[in-house]
C-alpha cells in the first residue's frame, strides 16, 4: 500500500541538498509509517501536521547550524 494522505507530499525530500535530505528523509519515513500503521482519522491528521512542523524546524536548525 502506498501512502496517499494529502500531507505526505510536504515530507518530500528528494529536491533538497544532501545535508538537508538526510534530516528530512527520517521524517518522511516516519510519516509514511504513520499513515500505513495508524487508522486515518482527525488525530492521525493532527499527528502528521505536528510531525511536519517538527520536520520544518529540524531542517531550519540544520540550515542555521551549517
Image (cartoon, rainbow, N blue to C red):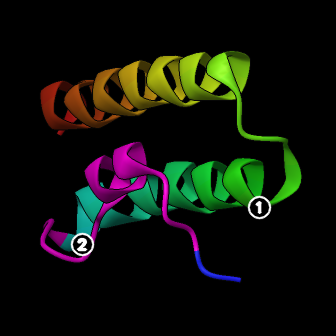
Residue in the picture at 70% in, 28% down? 41
Above/below status of 40 relative to 10: above
Q: Main secondary structure of the magenta part?
A: loop
Question: Under tag 2, what secondary structure?
Answer: helix
Query: Any magenta on residue 6?
Result: yes
Residue in the picture at 15% in, 25% down? 64
Quarter of the picture holding the C terminus: top left
| Mark 2 or 1, closer to the camera | 1
The magenta segment: 3-17
Contact (Cβ within 8 Å) of mark 2 with mark 1:
no
Q: Identify the residue at the far front of this view.
A: 41
What residue is shown with label 1? 36
Left or right for 56, reference 47: left
Left or right for 50, reference 24: right
Number of on-image labels? 2
The part of the image, by quadrant, that contains residue 43 is: top right
Query: Any magenta on residue 58?
Result: no
- Residue 36: image location, x then y, percent: 77, 61
What residue is shown with label 2? 18
Label 2, label 1: how many angstroms apart (C-alpha)?
26 Å
- Which callout, 2 or 1, points at the residue further toward the start of the chain? 2
Q: Identify the residue at the far bottom of this view.
A: 1
Crowd tier of the residue under label 1, counting other residues whose Cα lies within 10 Å: few below 14, some 14–19, many 20 or above: some
- Residue 29: image location, x then y, percent: 62, 62
Above/below status of 51 relative to 9: above
Crowd tier of the residue under label 2, counting other residues whose Cα lies within 10 Å: few below 14, some 14–19, many 20 or above: few
Left or right for 37, reference 44: right
Residue in the picture at 57% in, 27% down? 45
User: 44 or 66, which is in the foreground?
Assistant: 44
Amino acid at each position: 500500500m502506498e501512502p496517499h494522505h494529502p500531507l505526505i507530499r510536504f515530507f518530500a525530500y528528494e529536491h533538497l541538498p544532501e545535508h538537508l535530505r538526510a534530516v528530512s528523509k527520517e521524517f518522511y519515513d516516519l510519516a509514511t509509517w504513520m499513515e500505513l500503521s495508524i487508522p486515518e482519522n482527525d488525530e492521525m491528521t493532527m499527528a502528521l501536521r505536528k510531525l511536519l512542523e517538527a520536520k520544518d524546524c529540524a531542517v531550519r536548525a540544520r540550515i542555521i547550524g551549517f
